[in-house]
Image (spheres, rainbow, N blue to C red):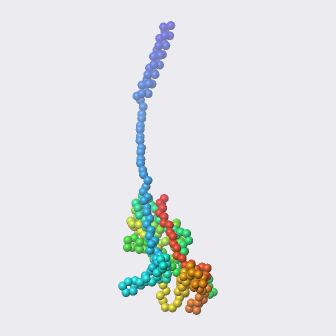
Amino acid sequence: MEKNVSLRTASGLFILVLLTTCIIGATFAKYTTTGTAADTARVAKWGVTISVSTDSLFKNTYSGNATGYEAKATVKSNGTHVVAPGTDGEGLNVSSAGVPEVSYKMTIKLNDTPAMPSLMYTPDAGSATPYEPVKFSVTSTVGDATTVIKGDMDLAALIKLFDGDNTIIEYDIDTNKYYVDTSGDGSIDGAEKNGGTNTCPSIQIKWDWKYEGATGTTLNDELDTILGNSAANVGVSSSDQIAIPESITVNGLNYSITKGSINTDASLDWTITATQID
């Protein structure tokens, strides 16, 4: 009996020793490693502004060659902007400014239904031909340096250049420089990125209606006169209107005029957009 009690007591003590050893081991024997991480950021700066000026594109008064000490007005309307043979203008003058932290491109779109004075004429034994006397050129200016992007364009060519997708100016955040599509092909290629400027270029639109100064009547003179008389007929009673010929003869050649094609209005409307480059 005493032997069994002794065995039970020894077993209990052995179990108690094991439990104590486990508790002590769990309390004092373990590895631990701790790491932390943090970061902060803000929105990249945009702040791009676009400057546009069209006040001088069309006028109601134009001066011809200087006479004496002052240039005299050779074209003057009743206050409405006009265009005429021998006149020209420059405007738009698009540029941008700001301190962006992203690259971006600038595009220009000619909106709605732009118009320029025009008509259709057909020479004998020929096909219908458009006559549009106002021609455009687009230039880029940085400081005193001016580069012609495209010149001698009709309205259709101007619409194609300013279609809203073609990149006109690009700002590269990596080089902190502005680049211009000097070829007018709608993109900034490698050759055009060889230069660049730290100042945003200004894009100008120039137009002119050439004056025929040579002696003798030309086809352009006759067509210009038809446009001018058609403008004079606007708002005038039919009994007082100037007759517009259905055909003209110039230097022995005959040309028929498509009366329904005559337009005497000049209208241009742009949207200029700066867009981040991804």
Residue depicted at 52% across the width and 76% down the height: 266
Question: Which of the two residues, 117 or 233, is positioned nearer the viewer here?
Answer: 233
Question: Which of the two residues, 80 or 137, is positioned nearer the viewer here?
Answer: 80
Task: Confirm whether residue 216 shows in the render.
Answer: yes
Question: Which of the two residues, 243 or 252, is positioned nearer the viewer here?
Answer: 243
In the displayed structure, 18 sits above or below 135; it is: above
In the displayed structure, 27 sits above or below 259; it is: above
Q: Residue furthest right?
A: 125
Looking at the image, residue 203 sits to the left or right of residue 256; the answer is left
* Residue 142 x/y as whole percent: 39, 70
Residue depicted at 43% across the width and 65% down the height: 96
Question: Which of the two residues, 233 or 56, is positioned nearer the viewer here?
Answer: 233
Q: Residue furthest left?
A: 69
Task: Confirm whether residue 131 shows in the render.
Answer: no
In the displayed structure, 29 sits above or below 224; it is: above
Residue depicted at 41% across the width and 47% down the height: 39
Residue depicted at 47% across the width and 76% down the height: 58
Residue 226, picture quadrant: bottom right
* Residue 111 x/y as whole percent: 53, 69
